[in-house]
Amino acid sequence: MSTNRRRHWSALIAALALGVAVPASIPAANSAQPQPTAYANGAVAGARSGTFTPASYCGIVWGSLARHNAVSYTTGTVANVRSGRHACYDRLVVDVAHVPESLSYDVRYVDAVRRPGSGTKLSLNGGADLQIELRAPAYDGSGKATYQPADPMHLVAVGSYDTFRQVAMAGSFEGSTTFGLGVRARLPFRVLVLDGPGSGARLVIDVAHRW
């Protein structure tokens, strides 16, 4: 053993005997370091990042503002009303026969749907009223009805639906037909115009199950 090494060990033994703490010269190679926690949504706890915004319900970004398509009155006529349930929304379809161009409509939430002509309030089930004004009559040029439901206050059965509470026909007056859609709450909706069947078109209203 060299003289320098003997001096090193002698000093170390003396320090231990006096109770002096001797710091380790080399830190442990496998010492644990705190790590950020990753979550399934991609956020990382402890990491600096922007505010995390959860994805919207079913990717829906429709909103609840009025939708309208202001084109001239169509020569088509209302032929039928039907509905359907989907995973993320409830759907209402108004079939319009013999449509040469796009449909003209105005769909919006209102305090109360009113009958065209008289202005009488239409009482609907649900927490919010969606008024659907389709600028197409439910009668032909001679005044004969093209759509005459058995019960204008209950056009389709929606008792098992998530969002729809009632579908009613407020009336058809001066070339325009108004429907009232009672929904659970003021929820996001969209309006589509689809071709068919045949030479007709479909006015489609989808209302989301939730925000």
Image (tube, helix red, strand yellow):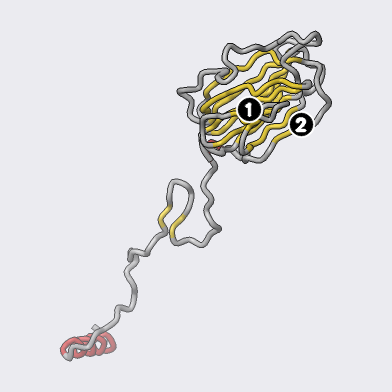
In the image, residue 32 sits, relative to residue 13, either above or below, namely above
Which label belongs to residue 122? none
Q: Amino acid at mark 2?
A: Asn
- Mark 2 vs 1, N-terminal side: 2
Q: Nearer the viewer, residue 16 or 90?
A: 90
Image position, residue 91 (x, y; %): 58, 25
For residue 33, above or below residue 70: below
Secondary structure type for disc 2: strand
Residue displayed at 61% across by 39% down: 111
Looking at the image, the residue that sits furthest to the right is 72
Q: Quadrant location of residue 36?
A: bottom left
Categorize mark 2 by other alpha carbons within 10 Å: few (<14), some (14-19), many (20+).
some
Which one is nearer the viewer's eye here, 113 or 195? 113
Q: Residue at x 68, y 32 (%)?
A: 107
Q: Position of residue 61 (x, y in %)?
A: 61, 40
The quarter of the picture where the N terminus appears is bottom left
Seen from the viewer's position, the closer of residues 41 and 86 is: 86
Residue displayed at 65% across by 29% down: 120
Which residue is rendered at x = 65% and y = 14% of the image?
A: 80
Mark linked to residue 205: 1
Furthest residue in direction left, as rendered: 17
The secondary structure type at the circle numbered 1 is: strand
Whether residue 32 sits left or right of residue 127 in the image: it is left
Q: Which residue is mark 2?
A: 69
Q: How many marks?
A: 2
Q: Which x, y percent locates residue 66?
A: 68, 38
Q: Residue type at mark 1?
A: Ile
Q: CA distance from mark 2 to mark 1?
A: 13 Å
